[in-house]
Image: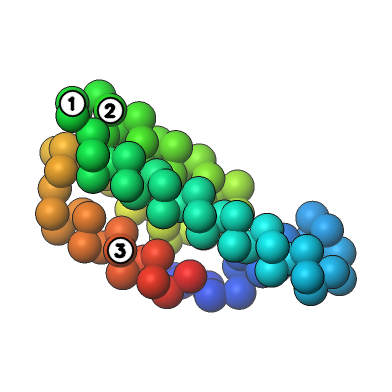
Amino acid sequence: MAYDPGAIDATLAAAVGDEPALIAELREAFLDGVKRCLEAMKSADTPDAWSAAALRLKGLSASFGAVRLMALAGEAATGQAHDNQVLRRLHRAIERL
């Protein structure tokens, strides 16, 4: 799956137009939400809580056009809870945003 670093900005620009300050603010809100989802996954005390947090991350990622992150979150939702390899891949994908 290809990674498009401009997808999030393009999605935001399509939603709000040519408003760089608003795009930056929404991008920051998106990243904060992504980080909260990841923290919820890490602190999940049951497989269902892990899956629910991963599905929130998947939905958030889909809303902002972060295709790679969306796919990884989907993989996490259906996989083993607290899978360290999946967490590392999610961290890398988030760092690239």
Where does residue 6 sit, x and y in percent of width and height?
Answer: 61, 74
| Residue position marked by numbered label 3 in the rendering | 91
Where does residue 95 sit, x and y in percent of width and height?
Answer: 39, 71
Label 2, secondary structure: give it: helix
**Residue 3 or 25: which is nearer the viewer?**
25
Residue kind at label 3, given as amino acid type: His
Where does residue 33 sit, x and y in percent of width and height?
Answer: 50, 49
Q: Are marks 3 and 2 in contact (CB under 8 Å)?
A: no
Mark 1 crowdedness (10 Å alpha carbons): few <14, some 14-19, many ≥20:
few
Residue kind at label 2, given as amino acid type: Ala
Q: Is residue 24 left or right of residue 13?
A: left
Where does residue 82 sit, x and y in percent of width and height?
Answer: 15, 43
Mark 2 crowdedness (10 Å alpha carbons): few <14, some 14-19, many ≥20:
some
Q: Are marks 1 and 2 in contact (CB under 8 Å)?
A: yes
| Residue position marked by numbered label 2 in the rendering | 49
**Residue 29 or 95: which is nearer the viewer?**
29
Label 1, secondary structure: give it: loop
Task: Choose top left, top right, bottom left or bottom right for residue 26.
Answer: bottom right
Distance of mark 3 from mark 2, alpha carbons?
19 Å
Mark yes or no: residue 1 visible: no
Q: Residue, x 53% and y 73% (percent of image)? A: 4
Distance of mark 1 from mark 3, alpha carbons?
21 Å
Q: Residue, x 86% and y 71% (percent of image)? A: 18
